[in-house]
Image (cartoon, grey):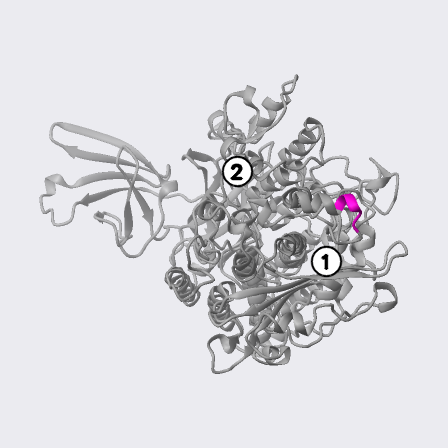
Amino acid sequence: MAHHASFSSSLIYIKRPHDNNKKKMQLINFNHNSGSMTYLLQKPHVHQSFIINSALFRPSYTPHKNSNWFLKSSLTKKVHIRRCLVSPPCMRVVMATSTNNSHHNVKALVTVKQSDDGLIKNIVTGIVGNNHLVLELVSAELDPRANSERETIKGKAHETEKTENNVQYEATFELPTNFGNVGAVLVENEHSKEIFLKNIVLDGFPDGPIHLNCQSWIQPKDDTSTKRVFFTNKVYLPLQTPSGLRKFRENELIELRGNGEGERKKSDRIYDYDVYNDLGDPDINIELKRSVLGGTKQFPYPRRCRTGRKHSDADKLYEERSTLDFYVPRDESFSETKQTQFNKSTISLGLTTILQSLDTLLTDTNLGFANFDDLDAIYKEGFQIPTLESNDLTFLQKLIPKFFKDADDSQNLLRFDTPESYKRDRFFWFSDVEFARETLAGANPYSIQLVKEWPLKSKLDVQIYGPSESSISREIIESQITYSTVEEAIEEKKLFMLDYHDLYLPYVSKVREIKETTLYGSRTLFFLNSEGILKPLAIELTRPPIDGKAQWTQVFKPDSDSTNLWLWRLAKAHVLAHDSGHHELISHWLRTHCVVEPIIIATHRQLSSMHPIYRLLHPHLRYTMEINKVAREVLINADGILEISFTPKKYTMELSSVAYDKLWQFDLQALPNDLIHRGMAVEDLNARHGIKLTIKDYPFANDGLLIWEAIKQWVTEYVNHYYPSSSTVESDQELQAWWTEIRTKGHADKSEEPWWPKLKTQNDLINIITTIAWVASAHHSAVNFTQYTYGGYFPNRPTIARNKMPTEDPTKEEWEKFMNNPEQTLLECFPSQIQATLFMVVLGLLSEHSPDEEYIGEIMEPSWGENPNIKEAFERFQKRLKEIEGIVDSRNEDRNLKNRHGAGIVPYETLKPFSGPGVTGKGVPYSISI
């Protein structure tokens, strides 16, 4: 119900400070009934007047600290005048109290994002003055007489003004003095299309304005049956929720959960779970059927967002893929800035077009590079695409301007930036030292592990896969190390390994049925020398019994004779393909993108937006569901980019399910636990971070522990502020439901595992939140933003090895071909032209920061800034991150740290917290945003 006040007119005099000349005082006539002021500006020979609308006024009991004006009035009320940065000069004048003791005036300033598509611009310019948004102020207190929610106070936004980026609406309200504190605002959108609501400021309260940070799409009133509720920036644990807001808090969560039925519309805000049953496409071709991931013991998997699409006609297990625009909740979509950058660089729609076009343009999709000069020419001259008779290429050039840099259509060139590693050293990829160094400071620093026992043994069934003991003998190792025995080197923690044996070996037979690819199980051993540098010792490649043949296995060493040296290079290409696949599928996709999505879903379903943990986690959730949706559309789907580019081909995603089953544990995602589990650190309470690194110069671990420590300290201060005791953790029903749902629904296939942390104490909560924040920010950054740096020149990180080793059951012709031209054998083992160029495009896209990237600790969430204790804690966090930037720089200049400093070496900047836009090889965004 709206109330209207009635006041009399007043004369108000103002003068500049220290000005005693009464003639120069300014006279204002204030009409209380019309809500306006006439300002008579005294100048020599000139009298001007203009109206100041009362909607701009706000009450204040003390002069604004930046005000240069003082006020005298014939009224007894105190009035505050503010300068306004507009022309002509104006002042905002606000009555501190009302002559009507039963009500007081409140103004709402509503900010809506200016849309690039002209929607908001057209609304503003075409219908200025009409009512477009309906607001209802909600009291935080119940009506004591009825013991129910107070009647809301309605108002309509009636004025607008535009800036470059925003549109502002204003509404005025008359609030009864017994209304209590405003705790929320209900919003209805009377436009015919959705709008993006940024924030609401309620001005007119003695204690200052009330802020509501909205950042949400509002659907038209005619398209939704419910009003949107936005709570103030003040946070409450569930039991602390003001009585007038409890029902709104509960109902909002119920609406976000949905009922699990029907197909989701693009405008919906519903968060629900489903299995990965939309990667295959049997409606197109039965050969495109893929295993359903999740919901079975055979292929356990984290859950994705439910879309409710109808199921395939060809196989009811699958959701159809008729349109490549899958549902995500509306507020999970990219911002216009992000979407514009994304579209220009292409991935969502453009990458599919590139794939289809290149596939038809190239006469032989399996064609490799003839020589290394042709490969190097990609960066100098571009990749030549045959001329099309139609205008398809022009469309491509418009779609992906980042890569088509030449304006001359007739040249048809796809160009690539030269990767930083290749700029510094053209032959870096040939170096065994660099091969080893990148296990500690490259794109995949998560796989290297300590050798803890000898001999090396497989855990697979010997009846199926052959002898379990490794072929890497004691003699092979001891001939290359400075210790007398292998056992002594192991005891001194000097032997390390990349172990892709048991994970890949069960898939060797399946993969080898596919043309133009092959697979082995592999182990690669390294020795840590006295300079702190890893030296490769041996590569073991194994093929299980197949087609009636016994197990084949061979060990390759970096020998000096030419034949064995070329065999070593070929074996290294296979290992690099294994590492690239493990990196992209497991270290990157599975351990960040995939496992975080159900955490995001649970957060929206179980934690109210006024919950302090929701506010803490919210920056870490940005854009992840949208980028995962795009991945399901064009990257990880049947015949998608990963299947085309990586060794396991159609078993690529199935393999990630096996890794989830056998390797993933929530508790091991915490960086210190991960390092200890891999043997890369040991517990040491006297050491900083509570652990001591096995390799002192381990750039990822050294810098990562700084970030981990900073995040944990920030989370600790935040959690302890809101949870003063363990009982407050255990009694928080929303928090307990959130953690239960993450385990039992989001990760339902592993819900009974004993390693899930309990949630009973502040420390439990601190460790859980720190782990989630780490995975979404620094873990993802460590495996994502240097992909183009190290993989942009694909011989350094080939995604696929297409041919078996020349020594595996060779024909006479195969062996002679290798002996006569080993370089050609290596080139034919590398990815084909289409595989290489396609994935180079993908790596460039994935390594790129958007202009609207939000880096960890860079921006303070509004609710944090309104609490002095939290604000101070965040500022300490921010300060520490800036200090870490300097520490990383100083480490990169230290000549003693040879894994991050040296001739031709790319400095390790991956975990420097901040970055500009583009492919920079550094920067830690809050969230998995690409």
Q: Secondary structure at mark 2?
A: helix
Query: Residue 302, labelled with which disc?
Result: 1
Can residue 456 be seen?
yes
Q: Is residue 444 magenta?
A: no
Name the amino acid type tagged 2.
Gln
**Relative to residue 438, is residue 84 depicted above or below?**
above
Q: Which residues are magenta?
A: 810-814
Main SS of the magenta part reads helix
Q: Is residue 603 above or below residue 768?
A: above
Which residue in the structure is indicated by mark 2? Answer: 341
**Neighbour tally class for label 1: few under 14, some 14-19, many 20 plus, Cα within 10 Å:** many
Q: Cβ–Cβ below 8 Å for labels 1 and 2?
A: no
- Callout 2 environment at 10 Å: few (<14), some (14 to 19), or many (20+)? some
Q: Which mark is residue 289?
A: none
- Relative image position of residue 233 (x, y in whole percent): 49, 57
Q: Is residue 158 left or right of residue 237?
A: left
Query: Could you tell me the amino acid type at mark 1?
Result: Pro
Furthest residue toward left? 21
Between discs 1 and 2, the one toward the N terminus = 1
The Cα–Cα distance between marks 1 and 2, rounded to whole angstroms, is 29 Å
Q: Position of residue 197 (x, y in %)?
A: 52, 43
Quick one: 44 or 299, which is closer to the camera?
299
The image position of residue 752, as x and y in percent, is 77, 70
Q: Is residue 3 among what the camera can see?
A: no
Residue at 24% x, 31% y is 49
Foreground of the two, 770 or 125:
770
The x, y position of residue 109, in whole percent, is 44, 44
**Residue located farthest toward the top when viewing the structure as drawn:** 389
Q: Nearer the viewer, residue 655 or 79?
A: 655
In this rendering, the answer to whether 400 lies above or below 835 is above
